[in-house]
Image (tube, rainbow, N blue to C red):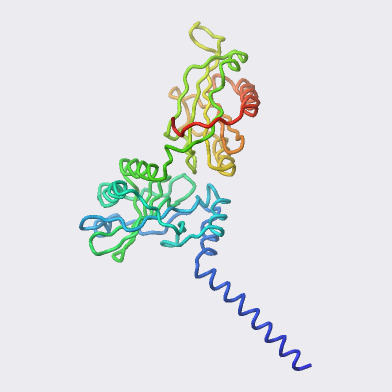
Amino acid sequence: MAGQMGRRRKLAWITGGIFTLLAAILLIDGRVVALLRFAGTAHQPSFDRDFRQLETLLPAGDPEIQEVYQGLAHPYGNKDAFVRQLWESPNRSILGYRFHEQQEMLAPDLKEKMARVLSRQDSFTPYGGPKMCGGYHADFAVKLGGDGQVRWMLVCLGCGEVLIKSDDGEVICDLSPLAEVLLSEIWSEHRGDPHKVVGTRLPVEDSALTSWGFKEYTRSSAQLLPGKKPRIPPENIRTQTILSTETVGDPRGPRFVYMLREEAFSDDDAAANRVVELNAPAGPKDNARDGTPPVRRGFAIGSQVYVISAQMKYGGAEISDMEVRLRDYLKSEPLREVMQFE
């Protein structure tokens, strides 16, 4: 009997030791901490905000990019993808943030451009506080050397913020508008974003518009984000403005004018989150120049988000009717493959 109890205690010790070891490995690896710290949270970094430190943290000699890593999905705007990548993809911690383990191999000219931007003092401005973009998320991390020292720079293109840390200290800064544009262009060119094949259902064909009593005014596709920026940028944006053939007052003045916009996202979750953002109450900054608030409806079909908007003077009932027509039409249309931003 005593021998049997001893074996049970021994087995319990072994089992407990295995679980303790596994827990220790996970904690040391940092993924559990990252899950608790970031998933579903609009994160705000706790880095030092003293902008006077910047000069001592930038390279004194010719800058050299030694390593570049891409961040995992946005833990707030795309929580499901973040958790999936955190547990299923090889990833590592840099300054407590998670990045894909495989290095990004930038072309020599892009590395030179990126190093030049990140080493200039005028690329940075004092930190202006948290942005309304779903929290800080590092799109990429750069290990920058060139003067015998090494510093990490973690860049968030969504909110235009960068964390800088070396042996001499740390600071959080905002990117200058020019630096933000340049880094976005460099990163997009490296990732091949402007050359991806994406799906679209716009424009609405003339035959459908005619049957609704409308005609096309303009159409466009652009890489520029709309006024109400999403937490996760879309992979493609297409717009179409339509006018009613029925006029009011001036024969040249259409009774109704609607703008249709399509935003293509990488997955259904990102699209669903975007719809929540779009259908939130509009603020004064969304008003037209004459002060009239907009009427806007957003809905998703798979990973595509569609927005129909008009000014309040056109009335809510009419936009509801148009939303039903547009939704029914788009659901019946298959996605067509087009080149991104073309």
- Above or below, comparing residue 164 to residue 266 in the picture: below
- Figure label count: 0
Quarter of the image for the N terminus: give it: bottom right
Q: Residue 250 placed where, x, y %? A: 49, 6
Q: Residue 215 placed where, x, y %? A: 54, 14
**For residue 329, which quarter of the picture?**
top right
State whether residue 142 appears in this view.
yes
Farthest-out residue, left? 61
Q: Residue 146 placed where, x, y %? A: 24, 59
Residue at 65%, 27% (x, y): give it. Answer: 332
In the image, taking residue 11 as reference, residue 236 lies left or right, namely: left
Farthest-out residue, right? 1
Viewer-proximal residue among 190 and 62? 190
Residue at 56%, 58% (x, y): give it. Answer: 88
Quarter of the image for the C terminus: give it: top left
Farthest-out residue, bottom? 2
Viewer-proximal residue among 330 and 74? 330
